[in-house]
Amino acid sequence: MPNPLNPSALVQFSGLGTQLIGSVNIYEMPDTGNIDIAFVADLNSIQVPVSLKSSGSWTLTNNDSTLVLDNDSVSFNFVMVSGLPTQQVWTTSFMQVPADSSYWADIDLELTLIK
C-alpha cells in the first residue's frame, strides 16, 4: 500500500484477517454462485476492513482446478490447492480499496470448503 508518510513509495504489510462473517454459495443447473464475506485485515497495527461481494455464473477451467466466478464486471479466479472428497481448499487474490481512502491492500484469501 502507499506509504502514508511518502505517498510516492510503497510499504509492504502482512497480517491475518479477523472477525470473518459471510457465506459462499455454489449452485448447479444453472451454474451460478455468490460470495459475500467481510473481515478485518490486521496489517501491523493498521486495521483495514475488507469485503468481497459478487454473484454470477461460474465455470471450471484447468482440469477443474480453477473456479471462475464471473459477474459481468469482474471475475474472481479461485485456484484449488487441495481437493479431498470431503474438504477442498481454494485461494484467490484481489485488491481492496476501503471507502474514502487513498490506500489499498492486496488481499490473499484462502477458503476451506467442508462437505
Image (cartoon, grey):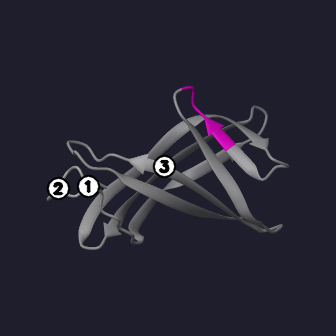
Q: Earlier in the sequence, mark 3 or mark 1?
A: 1
Q: Could you tell me what secondary structure mostly forms the magenta stretch?
A: strand
Q: Quadrant of the C terminus?
A: bottom right
Label located before the other in sequence (2 or 3): 2
Disc 1 element: loop
The residue lying toward the viewer, choosing from 6 and 24, is: 6
The question of residue 60 being in magenta is answered with no
The amino acid at mark 3 is: Phe
Q: Nearer the viewer, residue 5 or 19?
A: 5
- The image shows a total of numbered marks equal to 3
Q: Is residue 73 above or below residue 107?
A: above
74 left or right of 77 in image: left
Find the distance from the CA under tag 2 to the CA under tag 1.
6 Å
- At x 29%, y 73%, the residue is 44
Residue underneath mark 2: 6
- Rate crowding at label 1 as few (under 14), some (14 to 19) or many (20 or more) other CA atoms within 10 Å: few
Q: Position of residue 90 (x, y in %)?
A: 66, 60
List the single residue furthest toward the left: 5
Q: Amino acid at mark 1?
A: Ala
Q: Which mark identifies residue 9? A: 1
In this view, 35 is above or below 14: above
Q: Which residues are magenta?
A: 68-72
Along the horizontal axis of the image, is 62 left or right of 36?
A: right
Horizontal side of 18 relative to 113 (left or right) equals left
Q: Which numbered mark, 3 or 1, is in the foreground of this view?
A: 1
Residue 79, x across and y down, in percent: 68, 55
Which residue is farthest front? 8
Q: Is residue 115 visible?
A: no
Q: Secondary structure at mark 3?
A: strand
Structural distance between the alpha carbons of marks 2 and 3: 24 Å
| Residue bearing mark 3 | 94
Proximity of marks 2 and 1: CB atoms separated by less than 8 Å: yes
